Image: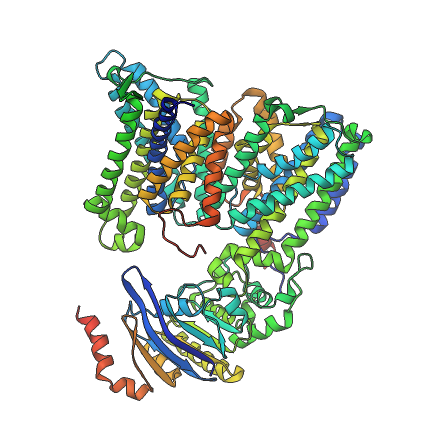
Amino acid sequence: MTLDTLFLQIVSGLSEGMVVFLCAMGLTLILGSLRVLNVSHGSVYMIGAYFVVAGNAAVQALPGHFYIALILSTIGTAIFGGIIEILVIRPLYKLEHIFQFITTFGITFIVMDLVKIVWGGSYYTINAPAYLQGPIIFHGFIIPKYNAALIVLGIVLFIGMQFLIHRSRLGLLIRGITVDRMMMSLFGIDVARLYSVVFMIGCALAGLGGALVAPISAAGPGMDVTVLIKSFIVIVVGGFGSLGGALLASMIVGLVNSFGILLIPKAAMGFAFFVMVVTLIFRPWGLLGKPIRLE
Amino acid sequence: MPANMKPWMITSLWPKIVPIVILFFLFPLFLDDSALSLITEALILALAGTALNILLGGCGIVSFGHAGFFAVGAYTFGLLLYYHLASFWIAMILAILAVILYGIITGWFVVRLVEIYFALLCLGFAQVIWVITSVWYGVTGGDDGLNGIPIMNSLYSVGNTYYFVLTVAGICLLAMYLMRESPFGRYLHALRDNRTRAAFIGVNTRQSIYIAFVISGFFCGIAGILIVIQLHSAFPSYAGFIKSGDFLFVCLLGGMYNFLGPLVGAFLFIFLTFFICRYTEYWPLFMGLGIVLIALFFRGGVMGFIMNWYRARKVKGGC
Amino acid sequence: MMLQVENLSKHFGGVKAVDNVSFSLAEGDLSSIIGPNGAGKSTLFNALTGYLTKDAGRVIFRGEDISALPPHEICRKRIGRSFQVINLFKRMTVFENIQTAILAGRPGALSFVRPAKSMVRKETEDILENVGLTEKESVLASDLSHGGQRQLELAIALANKPALVFLDEPCAGLAVEETKSMVKLIQRLAKEQGLTVLLVEHKMDVVFSISQKIRVLYEGRLIFEGIPEEVKKSEEVLRVYLGETDE
């Protein structure tokens, strides 16, 4: 393998890792603050991808149609998330967590088939905006512009998220409900609405991730389960509750996956899985997580 | 001790169970082959569902990857027979050992996590099995699956297969019932109802979950072996997400907190899929809707509904 | 010496929830720990009973170091515990709750096939009678009244015939009459079974009527230890409690 190909694989791996990072960030947010396991998180990601394809086709004539489609897709998945939260998850907060898993698991099946009904089983892709197509040539190394943009965007969103959680009022509220839901309601905060907002933000992140991946990877059946497992691997390897860990882990998983594809294409996920297994053996609380008694 | 209906025991229904068991043994005398095949499928599904329910209703733990056990059992058994590496019974024993090994290895990782992570990790391992079976074309036949697996001669008849499955499933169900009523079963219910408390009455929660996981997987793997005996084939979908969903749905539909729930759920499931699949290929859509609706409104499933009705009737009639 | 706690500390991040606490309990002692909210009482109990890892210090029970043991092993050493938040097995009946607790305390009773229904019936009924729940034995734990649930909490704590019991706010949420019954119950059982009891309570009348010795915890530190009369007269203790309500 030449140096250029190596570099290309690295860039491609990092950028795909960023997309998983967006999805994982949403999952961590929902899981960490609301303690809800949204099994259908992968489905939201998939919807994001399909929405951007559909949106792009719809506004094709307009300038900046890619960006419009992105925004529409993100808003669309946020709304979808809100609907799910209100109809299906909210009634179950007081019960054992088992029922939340089960219902979101059921939603995964519903979405899986709805997508097939509306769009059929084929794969769809769209083109990145014109000036993001093609490569940057840097000292003889080829860097696809779109992938580079993804990497930058991922880092920007990471910083933005840190800012949101630690410096904004919304972030304060979110950290509040993470610690003690009931206390927050005593402060006069509409906790139910806050939960919905957090859930929607988490879904929007996943949807954005799915939308962004459409130009490089294609929307198609099965992407929901794959990204769910990858997001999960990221959270475990990065450490529960650590956004920085998730970023780091996403990059690792992205790279491992990208090189794995070179070796055994269909089994690429197996390598990422292997990383998780190793982490679980030697450092079960993840790279940047806190050592806790996992009782 | 005054007799009282507990939600999860059906002691007073025993007199009604025995005639049903006898009926099952008599089915081949008057049912045709296609009906028998459906019932055989239902029994296998019931076995897998009851196995999953050891964790689900018994421990309050969800696994999204029980299909992994199912596939490991099916493929190990199938591969050994397909390539003539072992005789029927030896292949069965080796397949069982493989399932136990899968449970011990994956269980070690899985019990280190809690709740949702447990569920997803199980899914992850099942996906690994799925990838292996669908990628390793040369050995496993990939997506086409293994077809024409040779089994014991006498089992090529639908009737004989039915009896074989009925007997094996029956013994397994009995074993699972005994375990449920044993002290170990009580430990599991305790840690389901209150894990913190269970630790402080002396239950080693992690170890108990590990053991329950391996046992649950064991019985699910046997179901995988049985399906190969019935269909003479094995497919990667046996390890898939949808298959795990089927098992979960069966428990939920029939009632998680009742031992017979998964059995009832399995028969209803076969019945439903038989009709719904005639009209549409979108069975997962209906199943997903069913799962959501049941989890929202009918958490006790069919058996839960029946038990409540029975209890209400007893109160009216008795006191 | 039944229990020796030496320099026990537990921090969460920067907060010292339990700060260098030391005390000991002799056999048959009936004593309490009191302190304002957030003083660290529940954290202390959780650390003593193996639910939390300790950052420093040791816990020695009957000469044996139990500092690193997990909850289920500590329980098996004949230590019992009740919880501040009611922790029962909701889907089981009262009888089964206690029966399961007894079975779990006996590793030798573990079986995968023998029916549990008929095991240890005599012992279960004895405990039921001791706490006064015999008529309610077939009631589901979640259907009991609050008072009944507190009685069941106590029964489960005693299921294993412990020598030492930690009771975390056993009278929380009980009405005046029920509280009096609970106090009498605890006193009677302690005497009959020779229990060593360490109690955490907010209700001062309960504390003063049961305890021979009272320890006061404030911001994780043990600031006072003495007999009830001394505690009532202590200025320091008063300040600690009043200081809280002034906020």
Residue farthest along the left direction in this orientation: C246
What residue occupies the far top of the structure in this picture?
A61
Image coordinates of residue B249 in percent, x first then y, are 54, 37
Outermost residue, bottom direction? C229
Image spot of residue B237 (x, y percent): 58, 29
Query: Which of the image's four quarters has the C terminus of chain C?
Result: bottom left
Rendered view: B19 above or below C126: above
The answer to whether residue A30 is left or right of residue B286 is left
What sort of colour scheme is used for the picture? rainbow
Identified at 34% across, 82% down, the residue is C214
| Residue C2 point in image, percent of width and height | 47, 81
Does residue B222 appear in the picture of this structure?
Answer: yes
Q: Residue at x 24, y 16 (%)?
A: A131
Q: Nearer the viewer, residue A160 or B200?
A: A160
Q: Position of residue B124 (x, y in %)?
A: 50, 38
> Is residue A84 at all visible to an observer of this figure?
no
For residue B159, what is the image quadrant?
Answer: top right
Q: Nearer the viewer, residue A123 or A289?
A: A289
Query: Residue B225's quadrant in the figure?
Result: top right
| B178 shown above or below A41 | below
Residues B268 and B116: in front is B116
The answer to which quarter of the image holds residue A161 is top left
